[in-house]
Image (cartoon, grey):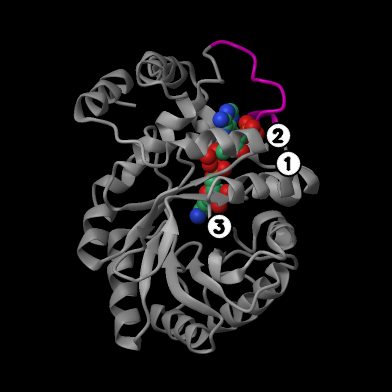
Amino acid sequence: MEFRYLGDSGLKISEITYGNWLTHGSQIENDAATACVRAALDAGITTFDTADVYANGAAETVLGEALKGERRASLEILTKVYWPTGPKGHNDCGLSRKHIMESIDASLSRLQTDYVDVYQAHRYDTETPLEETMQAFADVVRAGKAHYIGVSEWTAEQLRAGHALATDLGIKLISSQPQYSMLWRVIEEQVVPASAELGVSQIVFSPIAQGVLTGKYKPGAELPAGSRATDEKGGANMIRRFLNDETLSRVQQLEPIAADLGLSMAQLGVAWVLQNDNVAAAIIGASRPEQVAENVKASGVTLELDVMKRIDEALGDI
Ligand code: NDP
């Protein structure tokens, strides 16, 4: 496993990070979740990403249990705040001081840890003054409950404003967590250049487009049994944007490229996001430990320029 610095901080994270959205506390049983975490640790993953809203807090609880007994200093644990976890009262959403202060304590308790390494704003809150949000984050850091601050799916402009306030408050906003894959390249235009300038890294989610880039979803074919696209608890909904014949046919054209390199399609997908210098880590999800063992082998893979060009040509404008 290779490690990369997160933004301009001294914190190193494993370039392949394990995330538990839709799986822990939901799609898969707790034993399978523990087996995936074990496979991640065995493969050298030290960085784990979760959020309070995943499975209404259960994902944090399952991860906390699975990591129990591990040396805390050898792990980087990241969680997020924004959406309601459990009761949906009028103050249970967003980035108000009240919601942040209550949420961090609840997350730490579920994760069975005294601090998270990075506490992330899961989305931007257009209704709370950004000054209030950043002051609350600064107080969380000063209380020793988080070491660094990150954001998720903020625009370049929001990132600049948040970063400036964090710097004034003496805390470090070092990461941005957007969706990024061969099929979803939105951040390349504005977020990546702004981040590079600010000393912020991307920790990207859904690097294999929720499984679509494995090539297991075939155009015109039935959905594979047991896959995320068939999971009515939540996954099916989010993956749908990729499940059309045009996209799936293009994805099939990546197969000879992966084969020529001796990589699986999943490994090619994960390796592709890691070629971007501003990406510190690809957050992979898994419904079984074998997927972790396979995908983690993308660490350290270099894709030469001619390969990157072949990929662009195969995918065209999608
Ligand atoms: P991926 O793109 O890695 O998709 C993971 C899913 O793809 C697995 O659960 C599995 O689903 C399938 N899969 C993985 N490997 C293989 C393989 N080798 N062969 C076949 N199928 C495979 O990432 P996720 O979409 O899961 O996102 C990863 C993490 O990113 C999340 O856990 C979370 O931490 C973070 N995230 C953050 C968001 C945010 O708003 N900040 C939003 C979304 C995610 P199956 O077997 O069920 O088909």
Asked whether mark 3 and ligand 1 are closer than 8 Å, the reply comes as: yes
SS class of the residue under badge 2? loop
Vertical side of 144 occupied by 180: above or below: above
Type of the residue with mark 2: Asp
Residue 224 lies within the magenta run = yes
Q: Nearer the viewer, mark 3 or mark 2?
A: 3
126 or 163, which lies in front? 163
Q: Nearer the viewer, residue 65 or 42?
A: 42
Name the residue that disc number 1 marks: 27
Q: What residue do we see at 26% from left, 25% from top? A: 307
Position in image of residue 70 (x %, y %): 66, 64
The dot on residue 231 is 2
Quarter that holds the C terminus: top left
The CA distance from mark 3 to mark 2 is 21 Å
Q: Which residue: 33% across, 22% down?
A: 315
Say left or right for 178 vs 115: left
In magenta, the rendered stretch is 220-230
Q: Is mark 2 within 8 Å of ligand 1?
A: yes
Q: Are marks 2 and 1 in contact (CB under 8 Å)?
A: yes
Specify which label sits upstream in the sequence, 2 or 1: 1
Q: Position of residue 65 (x, y in %)?
A: 75, 61
The tag earlier along the polypeptide, 3 or 2, is 3
Percent x, y for residue 12? Answer: 40, 63
Q: Earlier in the sequence, mark 3 or mark 1?
A: 1
**Which secondary structure lies at badge 1?**
helix
Q: Is residue 237 visible?
A: no
Residue that label 3 marks: 49
Residue shown at the point (35%, 43%) measured from the top left: 274
In the picture, residue 143 is in which quadrant? Answer: bottom right
